[in-house]
Each structure stands twice: as C-alpha cells, then as structure tokens.
Image (cartoon, grey):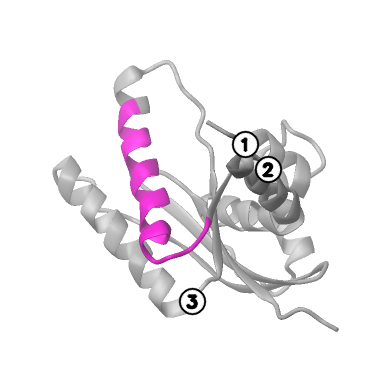
Amino acid sequence: MATPPIRILGLDPGLRRTGWGIIEASGTRLSYVACGAVLPPEDAPLAARLAALHDGLAAVIRAHAPDEAAVEETFVNMNPASTLKLGQARGVVMLTPALAGLPVAEYAALLVKKTVVGAGRAEKGQIRMMIKVLLPRSDVESDDAADALAVAITHAQHRGAAALRAAVLGATPA
C-alpha cells in the first residue's frame, strides 16, 4: 500500500533574505513544488522586519499547505550583533510553521550539504547544480531558495530517523 506524498517546506533563515522551498516526497521520489525568498524591507526597524518575515512565511504556508517544515541550523559568526539578529530571524522562521501546526525539524548546514552534494564543504554553486539534478523541474532564482530546497531534500531523506530520535527523546524521563 503506497503512502500519500508528504509536502515539505524547507527554510534557510536570514534577516535580509529567507529562502523557502517546497517539495513533495513519495517514498524515495522527490518532486519540485515551488521556491522563493521572503525579503523584509532592509530600511525598516528590526521588529517590522521580523513581522514582515512572519507574514511572508505565513503566506507561503497558506498558499502551498505543507505537511512538515525543516529549518537549517545557523552557524555562529564572529560578529555577536549579527549572530543575535540572525537568531531572532531564525526564531521567527521556526515559530511561523509551528504556529500553523507543522512539525519543525532542524538540520546542520554540514548535513544538508553532505546529503545533497555528498560533501560537507560544498559551495553554493554545487548546491544549485545538484538541486537542478535532483529536482529537474525546479526554477531556482537565488542561492537562498536553492539552500531551502536542499533543506527540504535533507528532511525527506532523514525524516524517519528524526521522528524516531524525537520519539525516543520524548519518552526519556526528564
């Protein structure tokens, strides 16, 4: 008996550009649905930019009705102020699908690159090239959207293990 396809929303958080990509996974078969980026106004105050990020992602969720979401973990850079702002954007990126009732998984950038390209130190161009190979109908216009599709593909490949890990951790006494 075939299982119904799962629609996955991949997210690449950023305060200037948050990439999003949606795929459908049916067993090992992946299909491209849509991708793009949410671009909050750069000249707006931080709170308004975060609100615009939320509103843009909520619109994507309403338009494409994903079943699950996956977010790329961010790395900490040398500038504490930039890291803090990115963390705030990432919080909105995780909160928005959670508020829509979607389970949200997280994946390290190294795992995303290794899953999609086969090497954890892959460059942006390599990711875009592999997205085109794995999702031939995709129309990727930015690195942010390509990264988001890569996160969605990673979730499609690892979601069973992630669910099992969550179940085991959830059953562990605190």
Residue at 43 percent across and 15 percent down: it is 78
Give the amino acid at mark 2. Answer: Val
Cα gap from disc 2 to disc 3, whole angstroms: 28 Å
SS assignment at label 3: loop
Residue furthest bottom in the image:
1
Residue at 63 percent across and 58 percent down: it is 152
Please report whichever mark, 2 or 3, sits nearer to the chain's N-terminal start.
3
Find residue 134 and report its horizontal and vertical position in percent. Answer: 77, 63
Which secondary structure type mostly characterizes the magenta part of the structure?
helix
Q: Which residue is under mark 2?
A: 168
Please report whichever mark, 3 or 1, sits nearer to the chain's N-terminal start.
3
Give the amino acid at mark 1. Answer: Thr
How many C-alpha atoms fall within 10 Å of the one at disc 1: few (<14), some, or many (≥20)?
few
Residue at 41 percent across and 70 percent down: it is 60
Q: Which residue is under mark 1?
A: 172
Q: Which residue is under mark 3?
A: 65
Find residue 50 and report its horizontal and vertical position in percent. Answer: 25, 49
Q: Which residues are magenta?
A: 84-103
Left or right: 163, with 63 as reference point: right
Give the mark toward the camera: 2 or 3: 2
